[in-house]
Amino acid sequence: MAAEETGSRFAHAWRALKHRNFKLFVSGQSLSLIGTWMTRLATSWLVYRLTGSALLLGVVGFSSQILTFLLAPFAGVWVERMDRRKLLVCTQTLAGLQSLTLAGLTLSRIINIKEVIVLASLQGLINAFDMPGRQAFLVQMVDDKQDLGNAIAINSSIVNLARMVGPALAGLVIAWVGEGYCFLIDGISYGAVILSLLMMRVKTTGLGRPATSMLVQMKEGWAYVSRFKPARTILLLFALTNLMGMPFTVLLPIFAGGVLHGGAHTLGFLTGASGAGALVSAISLAVRKSVRGLTTMIQIAAGMFGAGLILLGFSHVLWLSMLLLTVVGFGMMQGMAASNTVIQTLVPEDKRARVMSYYTMAFVGMAPFGSLLAGYLAHHFGAPHTVMLNGSMCVLGSLWFTTQLPGVRKVMRPIYVEMGILADAEEAEMEDHAGV
C-alpha cells in the first residue's frame, strides 16, 4: 500500500506533462536551458578574467537586466495583443543570434568589456518581451488550470536541473577550450526550444485589437497590482529579495577565485550547488496537490534565503560554501515558484500578461540595481561582507511579510472558496492556522 501511494504521488508530481504542448516545451527547454546556464557562467568568468573587477561584474549584471526593468510594463501590454507563440519564436531566435555573436567575438579573441556590456544589454531587451510572454503562454500550454501550479513547478525543476548541469559543464569547457565554446553551444541549443514551439498546436483566441489604448491598459495593469493586496505584498517581498539577495550570483566568481582560491571549475561547483538546492525545492513544489499553504512557504523561503547568505559570508571552505549555497538555492526557488504560482492562480486572464510583466520587473528588473549595488559594495568592503548585508535585508523582508499575512489571507480566502480550492468559509477560517 505504501509503495502504491508513493508511486501515485510521484505520478501526480508530473501530471502537467499529460498536456502535449507543455511536454513539447519541456523537452525543448531542457536542452536550451543547459546552454543558457553555460553562457551565464562563461560570461561571469570572462568578465572576471578580462578585468578582475567586482565593480565591472556588477556593471555587466546591471546592463543585462536594466532594459527588462524599464520595458516590462510596455511589454506586458504588447504580449496581450499578439500571438504569444510567435512572439516566443522571435525572442528565442534573437537570443540565439546574440549568443552566436558573443561566441564569434570570443573565439576570434577580439572580445572586450564594452562588447560584453552591449551584448548583455541586448539580452536584457529580448528578455523584457520573452519573460512575460513565456509566463502568459504557460496557461495556453496547460489546458486544465488545476495543473498550472504543477506546470510552474516542473518548469522550475528543469531550470534548476540545467543550473546544476550547465555550470559544471561550462567549467569543464572553459578549462579545456575557453569561454567561446560555451557561447557557441548555447547559440545552437536555442534551436531545440524553437522547434518545440513550432510543433505545438495552440488555439489563438482573444487576439483582436483591444478597444482601449496601450497607455490605458498599462494604467489598468498598474491599478490592479497596486490595489490587490495579495499581488502587491507578494511582489514587494519578491522585489526586495531580488534586489538584495539575487546579486549573490554576480559575486560568485569573487568567492571562487578570491575567497576559495579556485578557478572556473570552483565557480561551476558553487553555481551547481545553488542549482541543486533549487532543484530540490522545485520538486517539493511539484508533488504538492494544491496551492494551499504557499503563502507560508513564501514567508519561510525569504528567511531561509537570507540566513544562507549571511552564513555564506563567514565561509572560507569549499564544501561548507557549497552546502550553504544549497540552502540559498532552496530558499530562492521556493520563494520564486511559490510567488509565481499564487499570483498566476489569483490573476484574471484578461490581465495575466500585464501582471506577469510586473512579476518580471520584480524578478529580473530589480536585479540590475542589486548587481550594481553589490558590485560597488564588494569593491569597497569585500564580497563576504556584501552577501552578509544583503542576506540581513532578506530576513527583514521575511519578518515584514509575516506582519502582512493576515490581511493577505483575508483577501485570498473568498477567491479560493469561489475557485473550489477551499470548500467553504469554515474551512477557509481553519486554513488561517496553516496559511492559504
Image: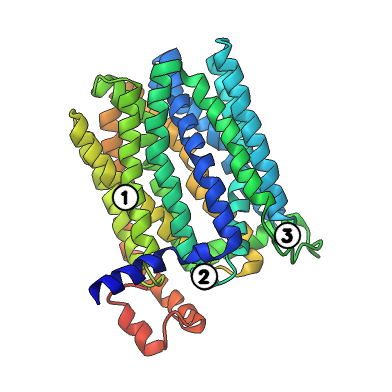
Q: Please, what is the three-letter code of the amino acid marked with disc 1? A: Phe
Q: Identify the residue at image location x=29%, y=69%.
A: 6
Vertically, is 240 above or below 235? above
State the separation of the CA atoms marked 1 and 3.
39 Å
- Residue 266 location in percent, x, y? 30, 26
Depth order, front residue of 132/202: 202
Tell me the tag on residue 216. 3
Q: Mark 1 points at which residue?
A: 330
Tags 3 and 2 in contact by the CB under 8 Å rule? no
Vertically, is 238 above or below 61? below
Depth order, front residue of 129/73: 129
Tell me the tag on residue 346. 2
- Other residues around mark 3 within 10 Å, as few (<14) / some (14–19) / many (≥20): few
Q: Name the quadrant containing residue 51.
A: top left
The tag earlier along the polypeptide, 3 or 2, is 3
- Residue 365 location in percent, x, y? 52, 43
Q: Please, what is the three-letter code of the amino acid marked with disc 3? A: Val
Check disc 3 and report its element: helix, strand or loop.
Answer: helix
Vertically, is 89 above or below 404? above
Tell me the tag on residue 250. none
Horizontal side of residue 289 vs 389, given as left or right: right
User: Which circle, 3 or 2, is nearer the viewer?
Assistant: 2
Horizontal side of residue 69 vs 232, given as left or right: right
The tag earlier along the polypeptide, 1 or 2, is 1
Quarter of the picture containing the C terminus is bottom left
